[in-house]
Amino acid sequence: MKRRFLPLIIVLLIFMGGFISGTLYSNTQKAKSVATSAEAAHSTKISGVKKEPQLKKQEEKVLIGYVQDFRKPDEIDFQSLTHVIFSFAHPYKDGSMLLNGDHAVKNLREIVTNAQKHDTKVMLAIGGWYHINGGESYDYFKAAISNPASRKKLVHELVSFAESEKLAGIDIDFEHPRSTEDALYLAEFAKEISEQLKPNGKELSIAVNAKVHSVTGTEIHSVVFEPSMFKYFDHVNLMAYDGQWDGDYNAANLSPYSYSANIVDYWTALFDKHGFSREKLVLGVPLYAQPQDPSIKQVSYEALINHHPANATKDHVEMNGTTYHYNDHATLKKKTSLALSQQLGGMMLWEAGLDAKGDQSATALISGELKKQEDPRYYTRK
């Protein structure tokens, strides 16, 4: 009898096991469903925390001010400037260099001391238009850099001076290379001095001719550069002024906005072509006014403002019996915007010692425009 009912008992046990397993599975799924529903309900009540968009900080733009060696150090706006370029050391044909007496050296040392309080860098410019012994610097400079021995000596003197006087670097102002030969000498000089400065963490900059005719807008071929040399420089300072001498003398061509725009177009195209960063380019502006009568001297921006504060809102004014042309605040702002929009490295002033003091300062104005990019609203979102 036990054997007869054994299959029936086995079937019954299998059925009951399946029923129990099914019930347990169903309850588990319901629990999961309830948990999932609870999570979903919670997510509708509390929004997920949004990540703040990451902000990409722009490179700090430079504001470089050339300062002549006779300026009073305590009158320089170090707070607004990132760099002061002390002007000038004068080259000799044998490769030696000289500053304009003990007074110039004293001023330089005071400038370095004052600049350190504001984290402003001080560099020394070699060259310029005029030489301490009279006439142009061109012949002296060319002779110094065209001979390997004198070139090496000049490099050594400049690098040693930068070290001993705690300078941030050297600025080259060879006005101007006039042939392919000149351009190659300048390129070799740049290479050799760069190799000495860069390992010590010092900068190298160069002031360059605008290379654009202020009237025709075409390239000037009487000034020649070897493009490959620009790889050695941290800053290439565009002297985007003195267009009054192009063609017939016209003071209005000193440095209008259109002239600067043409210059920026030329140099950005050149740098793009050769693969150099536009950040190296620095747009120069004049802080002086050019007289319509060339027999009359230029006047400083400070003199214009002292004559009448309203001159800050004009680009020409009648003074001393002649008309003076210059860059007013609106033009300076527009040029700064141009430099920023074209990804240039910043702005340059010739010359910082010519600026007005106080609220009408052109240096402070340009600095303010450049520093706007440091506000998060001006950062580029990734």
Image (tube, grey):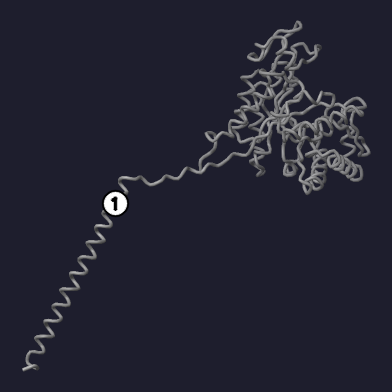
Question: Measured from the top left, where is residue 175 in percent x and y?
Answer: 81, 31
* Residue that lies at the very extreme toward the top in this rendered image: 321
Closest to the observer, 40 or 206: 40
Question: Measured from the top left, where is residue 368 in percent x and y?
Answer: 62, 27
Question: Measured from the top left, where is residue 35 in percent x and y?
Answer: 27, 57
Question: Measured from the top left, where is residue 7 in percent x and y?
Answer: 10, 88
Q: Quick check: can you spot residue 350?
A: no
Q: Residues within 10 Å of mark 1 (few under 14, many from 20)?
A: few
- The residue at 61%/19% (across/down) is 330
Q: Quick check: can you spot residue 190?
A: yes
Count of numbered badges drawn on the protein = 1
Residue 346: quarter of image: top right
The quadrant of the rendering that contains the N terminus is bottom left
- Residue at the spot of label 1: 40
- The residue at 20%/73% (across/down) is 21
Q: Is residue 319 above or below residue 241?
A: above
* Residue that lies at the very extreme toward the front in this rendered image: 2
Q: Is residue 13 above or below residue 337?
A: below
Which amino acid type corresponds to the residue marked 1 in the rendered image? Answer: Ala
Residue 339: quarter of image: top right
> On the rendered structure, is 343 left or right of 97?
left
Closest to the observer, 111 or 351: 111
> On the rendered structure, is 73 left or right of 11?
right
Residue 219: quarter of image: top right
Label 1 residue SS: helix
- The residue at 66%/15% (across/down) is 312
> On the rendered structure, is 19 left or right of 310?
left
